[in-house]
Amino acid sequence: MTDREWHEASDMRRSTMTLALIMAVAAILRFWGLGAGIPHAVGVDEPEIVNRAVHMMKAGDFNPRFYDYPGLYLYVQVAVSTLRFLAGATVGTWSSLAQVGPEHFFLWGRAATAVLGTATVLLVFHVGCRWGTRYALLASGLMAVMPLHVRESHYVLTDVPATFFVTLTFLLTLRATESPHASTYAVAGAAAGLAAATKYPAGLVLILPLMAVWMTPATRPSRRLAALAVLGACIAAFLVTAPYTILDLPGFLNGYAKLAGSYSGTPPSEPGWSISFKHLRNAFSWPATLAFLGGIALAAFRAVRGQGRTRWMLAVVFPLLYFWVVSRQSLIFGRYLLLLVPFLCVLAAAAVVSGVSLLRRYEIPRAPRTALIAALTIAALLPPMLQSIAWNRTNSKVSTVDLAYDWLKVNVPPDSVIVLESSKLVLPPASFHSRNVGQLRRQPYQAYVDEGTEYLVASSQSYGPYLDSPQKFPGEYKDYLEIFQQSRELARFSPTKDTPGPELRIFKVRP
């Protein structure tokens, strides 16, 4: 073996070991505390998916009758719930579908999301390999520790699965440019269809294979046929995995129109682009944010001049287009920007590695260059990693919501009627007759008595501002005071350093 072959083999082993470490970190951060809050404090919108998946499994009716999400991840969760039921039945946990409810399936459903989130890190590595191994390792490392992606990988929502399929489309499009045939582009188009069938805005990723076809004159048999193959595969994949889009066309159209209306309302007072950028800056922290901004500028330049124009264009067009679309919505949440994160990780890595590589022109010794890239890597990775660790530690702690739920299970008779104003505490319907409201003060105390309510749960997230500033909110303060004085307080759970969450008060309604 020559010295060069030995060094190449050694570099490959180091890269493999580094990738294995990155994947291990990605998995740990995404599976850490996966069961937190089940079944009483699950994430916002998680029940929208899990409840419907369990209903479809129990009823055998695969029409979701719900079109806030296209359908694919609902069916994935039906499959996961079915496997969970079979596993439980095998060990004697239950003997019929009548014995199970949605609360039994959240953990396995979350595990499916965590698996897709971890797999996305591997996809980012393979995307980065189109630039080079160092690019790939830094990009996948940044993706592995990204707090926005780590957090959302803990919930049964569509954002992380959609990010997986968007990244898969990116990778398959890059591969298609390396072997430009209609069939390889069709595979990328099918992946775009799966992205759209998971989350509607993710369908924008279809622009990648179409743009790649247009930028690759050597496509066989022709660019026109390849573009048609992309479109056909995308539509077919979407309809196969979200069939009731057609089978229940009126329901889909009505549901989609209602959904679209909620995002086209009154715009926020702050510009949408500013809100979106703050979400990204908070997730990446400033060093990695400056890196991906530099990567965007570098990609824009390389897309016009230099080698690899197509891959640079693919890397920069989708994030800019999607950022523009999201920033025009009236509702902007951090998780809506997840689809951008794999692209920004690749661009940040490109800025760091390419920037250091430019130093070779100035005859700077290798050791300082190596130290510089190590320092930049640590600066990019460390703040997001610390943020992800801190979130996981907090998420895994016993919260005031957990304490209140445990108290209710022990001290409140089953089938009691309970009204809660904490959106963070949701009681399983099999145990209690409960409903959640925005604020208890919205109706007078006597109304609770008349409707048979037995217990009230108040949250400082609702009453806190009014009790803290009675002079500023005299009416609201009086409303809450009347409720608290006429009922009997049974328990109070206040947050501490080791017990996060809102303050919760549990009251017994007195006629």
Image: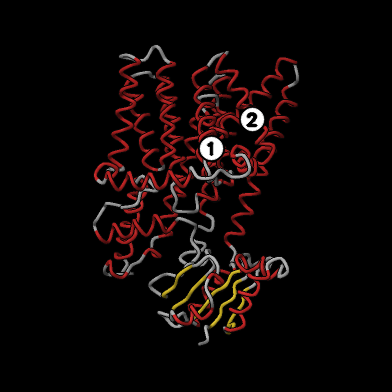
Q: Position of residue 304 (x, y in %)?
A: 56, 15
Residue 129, which numbered label? none
Q: Quadrant of residue 131?
A: top right
Residue type, numbered disc 2: Leu
Please tell me which residue is depicted at 32% across the width and 45% down the height of the picture. Answer: 252
Furthest toward the front, the residue is 475
Please tell me which residue is depicted at 68% across the width and 33% down the height of the picture. Answer: 290
Residue with the mark numbered 1: 328
Q: Quadrant of residue 224?
A: top left
Camera-side mark, 2 or 1: 1
Of 7 and 195, which appears nearest the observer? 195
Q: Quadrant of residue 394?
A: bottom right
Q: Position of residue 371 (x, y in %)?
A: 73, 31
- Distance from disc 2 to disc 1, alpha carbons, whole Å, reads 20 Å
Q: Is residue 211 above or below residue 145?
A: above
Q: Is residue 186 above or below residue 251?
A: above
- Density class for disc 1 (Cα within 10 Å; few <14, some 14-19, many ≥20) is some
* Residue 48 placement, left or right of 128: left
Query: Residue 24: in sight, yes or no?
Result: no
Answer yes or no: do the residues labelled 2 and 1 have beta carbons within 8 Å? no
Residue with the mark numbered 2: 293
Residue type, numbered disc 1: Arg
